[in-house]
Amino acid sequence: MGIRYDWQKEEIRAIYDTPFLELIYQAASVHRQYHNPKQIQVCKLISIKTGACPEDCSYCAQSSRYKTEVKPQALLDKETVVNIAQQAKNSGVSRVCMGAAWREVRDNSQFDQVLDMVKEVTALGLEVCCTLGMLTENQAKRLEAAGLYAYNHNLDTSPEYYSTIITTRTYGDRLNTINNVRQTNVTVCSGGILGLGENVEDRVSMLHTLANLHPHPESVPINILSKVQGTPLENQPDVPIWDVVRMIATARLIMPASDVRLSAGRAKLSQIEQALCFLAGANSIFSSDDGHMLTVTTPCPGYDADQEMLNLLGLEMRPPFVSQEKVAAL
């Protein structure tokens, strides 16, 4: 199966609707063509600036518009971030993502501090990803100069459903940020969230948008909504594991070279359910030293528990920068 950028929604829907076991078989087969099926990349997400975000994303614990458990916290100092990253590396993590609850990057001293963090954590020999909100082409180039490996900017959902979830920025704004990152050699990380109240057509439409980007995002996170008390989506129904696996498998088939990241919400999945996700093409997880993925409202399995699971499944932690080498060889 080659890499395509001309997918039609009907084709993607047909893949999504493939009988479950056949879908997993097809996805697993393609996964083996493009990736080492024995390796899982373990990532660590650090909230470098928490809460007080002016946006109204209906799922988010960090919005200043909702009363949640999250307490606003100023930008962490560089030493703290580097120490967390070093501990993560010692536990087998090969990618560290730094997230700031900003609407957009501003050219100020805080951005200068983030650039220093990127340089220092990159110097540890780790892939460094940032998710800082919207950014300009010039800001993307400054991050590239600091050594940034990846920039995360999720689409969240379909263009059609998006305004139901967020009104403080447009879908076009998100695509524009991705385009700004593409003016550099920084890789793109972009995916979405299941469980926002979307339907299957919305899921297919989001995947259609991602799969027709040229090139595809190097990373495609599939998040399961972490329901946060105090947000508009706190009472959403749980996402069935069948839907999660279908999304992972479909993403794997239409974006075969991309890393598909089993991201938020993994803490609710059993080891067997996670194994199904890996079989269907997920090859990355987020792990933690404190039981949280980004904030206290998003549980995340710990390093030791994840190591135990990978050992049980006969999987190994992937070293940094392997994916880029693999894709370049295709």
Image (tube, rainbow, N blue to C red):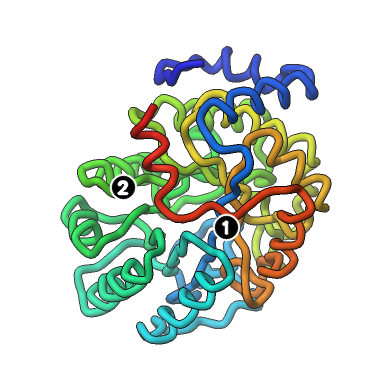
Q: Is residue 77 rendered to the left or right of residue 142? A: right
Circles 1 and 2, Cβ within 8 Å, touching? The answer is no
The residue to which callout 1 is attached is 42
The residue drawn where x is 43% and y is 67% is: 98
Residue 164, visible in the rendered structure: no
Residue 255: image location, x then y, percent: 49, 28
Given residues 31 and 142, the one toward you in this image is: 31
Residue 294, image quadrant? bottom right
Rendered view: 329 above or below 39: above
> Of the numbered discs in the image, which one, if any, rests on residue 80?
none
Dot 2: element: helix
Separation (CA) of disc 1 from disc 2: 26 Å
The residue drawn where x is 50% and y is 60% is: 56
User: Mark 1 or mark 2, which is nearer to you?
Assistant: 1
The residue drawn where x is 81% and y is 52% is: 271
> Of the numbered discs in the image, which one, if any, rests on residue 177?
2
- Mark 1 vs mark 2: which is more N-terminal? 1
| Farthest left residue in view | 138
Q: Is residue 64 rendered to the left or right of residue 38? A: left
* Amino acid of disc 2: Thr
